[in-house]
Image: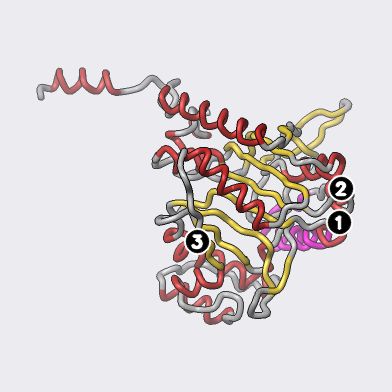
Amino acid sequence: MTQANNISSQLITSKPSYAPTMTLAMAQQRAQFISNIRQFFTSRQVLEVQTPLLSQAGNTDTFLQSVAAHVTYQDRPRTYYLHTSPEFAMKRLLASWQVPIYQICPVFRDNEIGTRHNIEFTMLEWYQPNYSLDEIATELNELLEALYGHSVVMSHYRYVDAFMDYVGIHPLTASLTALRAVAEDMGLTGFNFNNTDDSEENRRQSWLDLLFSHAVEPNLGHDLPTLIIEYPPATAALAKTAMDKDGNKIAKRFELYINGIEIANAYDELADGQALRDRFEQDNQLRARHNLPKMPIDEHLLAASNDLIPCSGIAVGMDRLLMVVTGASSLEEVIPFPSGQA
């Protein structure tokens, strides 16, 4: 090819700076994808709701960083936060109305960029009163079938079993020393989770998270969509805890993995305002040890939690789910403007 032809070819294939990373064909698939989700929930009489993106409270989770927004409220400067999930506000609705609800909305998590991450992304979240985790898993399975257009079989895999299969030690009973040694054997060096100001449970969970993300997650959901169940209690967040068949305390939650990608996260929801307050305060103490800002606790959520009826809830990363359904390899293919181009 001559130099002139090469330049001409580059001009033809290059895109203008304003162009989206998503093709028109994918945009049409995305629109149909969202329409199918709405039809799914309408047919089950699940009410679609819309809650604020901005809140005076923030997520206290140490590893979820909220995007702060400086606003003027009644002529005074205030700091609000873009929600990391619609969970808190939706639970206020659920406590008030006590009917099944769902929401499709943008959510925001600071400093998250990559082929599977973006600061702004789309979440589907729904809550079913009087549903167990098994029942919400069944409904998730039915949603996948509606979106894939064919029968879907999901496997269930205990966190303990997955960890032992791919890491080789028991995650709930292994010592801190053993967890660190295994991580170093796998080449996961340069991490320091031994801050003596942290509780032993938090230090253990940091090593577990590192090992799970590097050694376990990439292997999950390649043959069948896989539910990881019975997580360690330190990951309970807003979920209940219970004892497993071996007498170990576990969190009543599951996560869905497809092709090594985390797609969904479900809880048997904890309806205890004081217990949640204790967890949020512990989160803020841990944030302080990691030099992260203390987050204002959502007092409305705590009050609503005491009136919350038994229920299960689930959050689904819509962009990631569209990726696996369409065979896309990165978020850029299924959203028009990633954060770097927004």
Q: CA distance from mark 2 to mark 3?
A: 33 Å
Q: Amino acid at mark 1?
A: Gly
Q: Position of residue 254 (x, y in %)?
A: 61, 58
**Overall secondary structure of the magenta section:** helix
Residue density around tag 3, few if under 14, some if 14–19, many if 20 or more, within 10 Å: few
Residue density around tag 2, few if under 14, some if 14–19, many if 20 or more, within 10 Å: many
Question: Does residue 69 appear in this view?
Answer: no
Q: Image height check: is 128 above or below 156?
A: above
Q: Which mark is residue 273?
A: 1
Name the secondary structure under disc 1. helix
Q: Are marks 2 and 1 in contact (CB under 8 Å)?
A: yes
Name the secondary structure under disc 3. helix
Q: Image height check: is 246 above or below 10?
A: below
Q: Image height check: is 199 above or below 34?
A: below
Q: Amino acid at mark 2?
A: Ala
Closer to us: 220 or 133:
133
291 magenta-colored: yes
Q: Amino acid at mark 3?
A: Ser
Of circles 3 and 1, the one toward us is 1
Q: Which colour assignment does the render follow?
A: secondary structure
Give the residue displayed 66% in from the left and 42% down from the top.
125
The residue that mark 2 highlights is 304
Numbered range of the magenta stretch: 277-295
Closer to us: 301 or 61:
301
The residue that mark 3 highlights is 213
Earlier along the polypeptide chain: callout 2 or callout 3? 3
Give the residue displayed 78% in from the left and 61% down from the top.
279
283 magenta-colored: yes
User: Quadrant location of residue 18?
Assistant: top left
